[in-house]
Image (tube, rainbow, N blue to C red):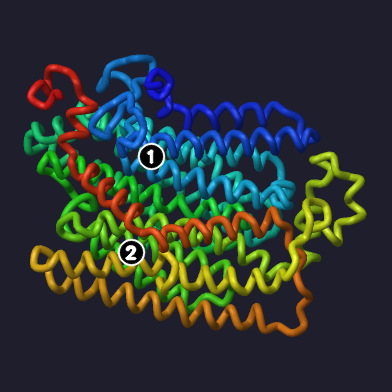
């Protein structure tokens, strides 16, 4: 069994790459086979991610030991070759990406993938970039997968019609292109100073730098940190995020919920490795990240309070969740990392469900029909154009008691995102609060107090804002009952059920997150596993 299991790490990259290429080459009129290929590819990615999750936790026969595995592309030995590295945290992020991606893809089948061209291949390439980011073991390929992810997200951000979406999408593209340029310059500086871009070898080289080269490395690290903070949606670099996320079509907004966590993941991964070298410049070390996250929570909370539309409010809730994670990871010690990973799972799944739910709750048939009308011809659906006033009838069967479902799902999303019982958002916030108190006296009392105040205040403001806008949406007596499809309601319900499972059986999920945290902070084990050459002989297993 281990013979084929050793190739699992490359599947989350290879499968969406091949699927995206085939979808680009296929005709848009072959709608059924394209949908089937897309669903099969995402299901295969989910299966591979779950297997890697079990292998990393020694629950399945593993082709490697110690919970960390490497896959050398082309069989070139690191640090000279390109490697993929799998540990518990990477496996968690892969599984989260595939779960959210499957829900967003199923939701899009009902109508939204027809709102523009190339949605399906762009979606696959986005998943490829996300998976590669979590798996890569060197900085240059982190840049490559970032660019694959961003290039696909540019097209998806502009998917559909409307001036606000185009303006927000162009701002999103401009900011991220500038960040990509900064990333490339920072990576070049790091390579010029250290002579390597392998993440495991980097701390070994940094520790040996002289004073002059170390100053140059600090400059490169600061530039790289800015890039990751832009991706994470940290204040004040997140001015582009609310409009871009709020104006995206619902399934795109749902999958975008995980994009900010890519920046958080990169900050955490590289920061832990740099701390092993004894040189962890801002924002990878010290209390800088803590205060950056705290200000991000404040900015997101003010945005939530000011928002007058649910989609924009949802975007600000994503900012609040990123700020919460940055603050938790900026704490002294590692006690908050496990609960923060659990909170990350809950917030991403809840945000994804909420973005899809908002469109159903505020559905306007005429606007939806206008949106779909732009590309009927491109998809060979001219015969259905006369029915554009009722696009819901084109796919699937309508669900009964639509308003009941919408009301219950909305309440569940509110409880989940603001951290009230009985869903996993409450478990995650309580775990964070408990871990922050347990970090005393190692962590400063001021940090603990500010963190607790930020969590409580952001939750109270979220409850007020969501209740206010929810009343406007659901107490509108003049609106007609929206026509919902099972393909739309099913993904939202599935994500909420996953969050319910996380809340009903938190021990297993929390213990896995704690193990992922322990593995992450065991940087020496990561380095020993990846670097086998004689220069690190004392660290060779």
Quick check: 525 above or below 340? above
Q: Which image quadrant: the N terminus?
A: top left
Where residue 518 appears, as percent x and y from the top left, is 21, 46
State which quadrant residue 339 falls in.
bottom left
Asked where in the image residue 190 lies, by quadrant, the reply is: top left
Q: Is residue 527 visible?
A: yes
Q: Residue at x 67, y 57 (%)?
A: 488
Q: Is residue 262 left or right of residue 293?
A: right
Question: How many tags in the picture?
Answer: 2
Residue 397 position (above or below residue 217): below
Disc 2 secondary structure class:
helix
User: Is residue 478 left or right of 62 when viewed as pictured?
Assistant: right
44 up-or-down from 73: above or below? below
Query: Residue at image x 38%, y 15%?
Result: 74
Q: Residue at x 35, y 79 (%)?
A: 457
Q: Which residue is mark 2?
A: 324
**Dot 1: element:** helix
x and y, in percent, of residue 377 in the image = 84, 43
Closer to the chain start, of discs 2 and 1, is 1
Please name whichever residue, 170 or 521, is drawn nearer the observer in this view of the structure. 521
Q: Which residue is mark 1?
A: 53
Q: Nearer the viewer, residue 226 or 385?
A: 385
**Could you tell whether 377 is left or right of 269 in the image?**
right
Gap in Å between the C-alphas at discs 2 and 1?
25 Å
């Amino acid at each position: 069994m281990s013979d084929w299991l050793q190739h699992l790490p490359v599947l989350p990259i290879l499968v969406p790459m091949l699927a995206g290429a085939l979808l680009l080459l296929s005709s848009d009129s072959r709608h059924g086979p394209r949908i089937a290929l897309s669903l099969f590819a995402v299901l295969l990615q989910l299966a591979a991610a779950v297997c890697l999750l079990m292998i990393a936790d020694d629950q399945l026969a593993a082709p490697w030991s110690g919970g960390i595995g490497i896959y050398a592309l082309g069989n070139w030995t690191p640090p000279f070759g390109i490697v993929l590295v799998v540990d518990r945290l990477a496996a968690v992020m892969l599984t989260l990406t595939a779960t959210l991606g499957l829900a967003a893809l199923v939701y899009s089948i009902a109508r939204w993938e027809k709102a523009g061209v190339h949605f399906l291949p762009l979606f696959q390439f986005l998943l490829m970039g996300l998976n590669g980011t979590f798996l890569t073991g060197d900085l240059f390929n982190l840049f490559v997968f970032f660019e694959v992810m961003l290039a696909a997200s540019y097209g998806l951000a502009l998917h559909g019609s409307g001036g606000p979406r185009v303006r927000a999408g162009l701002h999103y593209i401009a900011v991220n292109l500038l960040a990509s340029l900064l990333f490339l310059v920072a990576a070049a500086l790091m390579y010029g100073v250290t002579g390597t871009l392998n993440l495991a070898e980097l701390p070994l080289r940094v520790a040996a730098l002289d004073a002059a080269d170390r100053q140059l490395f600090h400059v490169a690290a600061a530039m790289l940190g800015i890039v990751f903070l832009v991706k994470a949606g940290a204040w004040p670099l997140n001015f582009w995020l609310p409009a871009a996320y709020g104006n995206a079509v619902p399934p795109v907004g749902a999958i975008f919920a995980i994009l900010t966590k890519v920046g958080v993941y990169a900050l955490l991964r590289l920061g832990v490795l740099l701390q092993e070298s004894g040189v962890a410049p801002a924002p990878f070390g010290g209390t800088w990240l803590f205060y950056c996250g705290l200000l991000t929570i404040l900015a997101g909370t003010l945005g939530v309070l000011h928002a007058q539309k649910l989609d924009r409010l949802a975007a600000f809730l994503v900012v609040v969740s990123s700020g919460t994670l940055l603050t938790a990871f900026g704490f002294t010690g590692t006690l908050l990392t496990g609960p923060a990973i659990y909170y990350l799972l809950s917030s991403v799944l809840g945000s994804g469900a909420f973005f899809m739910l908002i469109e159903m709750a505020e559905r306007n048939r005429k606007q939806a029909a206008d949106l779909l009308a732009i590309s009927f011809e491109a998809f060979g659906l001219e015969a259905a154009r006369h029915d554009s006033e009722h696009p819901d009838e084109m796919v699937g069967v309508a669900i009964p008691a639509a308003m009941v479902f919408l009301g219950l799902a909305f309440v569940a999303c509110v409880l989940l995102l603001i951290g009230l019982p009985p869903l996993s958002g409450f478990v995650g916030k309580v775990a964070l609060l408990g871990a922050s108190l347990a970090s005393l006296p190692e962590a400063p009392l001021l940090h603990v107090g500010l963190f607790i105040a930020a969590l409580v205040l952001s939750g109270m403001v979220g409850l007020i804002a969501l209740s206010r806008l929810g009343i406007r949406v659901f107490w509108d007596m003049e609106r007609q009952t929206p026509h919902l499809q099972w393909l739309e309601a099913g993904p939202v319900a599935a994500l909420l059920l996953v969050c319910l499972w996380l809340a009903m059986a938190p021990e297993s999920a929390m213990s896995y997150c704690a193990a992922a945290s322990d593995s992450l902070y065991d940087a020496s084990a990561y380095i020993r596993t990846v670097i086998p050459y004689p220069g690190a002989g004392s660290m060779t297993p």
